[in-house]
Amino acid sequence: MTALIDLNGKRGLVVGVANDASIAAGCARAFRAAGAELALTYLNEKARPWVEPVAKAVDSTVFLPCDVREPGQLEAVFERIDSEWGRLDFLLHAIAFAPREDLHTSVVNASSEGFGMAMDVSCHSFLRMARLARPLMTEGGALITVSFYGADRVVENYNLMGPVKAALESSVRYVAADLADEGIRAFSLSAGPVKTRAASGIERFDELLDQVRARTPSGRLVSTDEIGHLAAFLASNAAAPMSGSVVYADNGFHTTA
């Protein structure tokens, strides 16, 4: 019997690995364990030493820099994939950024420039990736981005990332509708809070972890590897009937009042 999560013969791009503890790293490990061949990116030369061990662990055959704020870098990644593989079956978009001074103030006090940068890096880059991936997904594919419960409900200290992630989740629905007739599916993977380097930018994040743990029915937080298993399922043919959904990987936290 064929395994339910089977990515053998599939090729995927993972954008957003910061180190081996990041959500994107957990997803990359799950993709590889299911049989996928992977391309990974790193933000810049400063980040490379932290990402390269992950790339080696998952036998990444394409490993390139990608800062979506730098003109041409994202396009270069897809050009390399086109020349190396000639196609793409799935991608994971796991990048988000907001200037610290704008993240650490209330939404009404966020600057126009900071809000615009957060929206461009955290949301519009997903649309750019969808556009670039589209001609490579000749046999259909899956576009997966990472979100958080703060897109749907007010989470203390999440601030401007709340409306940015809400825009990202809405973008997923529209992308799913736009590309449905091409067999390309889109998902927002809403992960429970995980202690990652990216999350450390949120004020009083340790308190948030404790609050979520206390309200989660199972009394425990989700791990990056568990999130990865769900991402691998979404990338597989087993998830073919699904698209446009916010899929929660939070041990049921989002169901609590």
Image: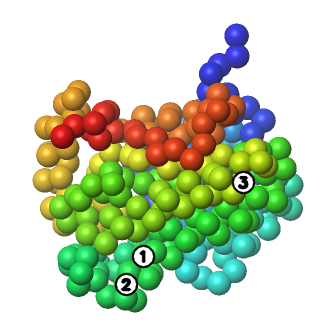
Residue at numbered disc 3: 179
Q: Nearer the viewer, mark 2 or mark 3?
A: 3
Q: Quadrant of the N terminus?
A: top right
Check the image and report above or below for 98 versus 190: below
Is residue 60 something one can see in this rendering? no
Counting other residues with Cα less than 10 Å from the Cα at mark 3, is it few (<14), some (14-19), or many (20 or more)?
A: some
Q: Secondary structure at mark 2?
A: helix
Q: Secondary structure at mark 3?
A: helix
Residue at numbered disc 1: 118
Point 13% across, 53% down: residue: 207
Q: Residue 54 appears at what percent x and percent y?
A: 53, 50
Is residue 18 something one can see in this rendering? yes
Q: Secondary structure at mark 1?
A: helix
Point 40% across, 40% down: residue: 248
Choose the circle earlier in sequence order: 2 or 3.
2
Which amino acid is tagged 3? Leu
Q: Is residue 107 left or right of residue 34?
A: left
Point 73% across, 72% down: residue: 76
Residue 114 is tagged as: 2
Q: Are marks 1 and 2 in contact (CB under 8 Å)?
A: yes
Q: Residue 67 appears at what percent x and percent y?
A: 56, 74
Q: CA distance from mark 1 to mark 3?
A: 25 Å
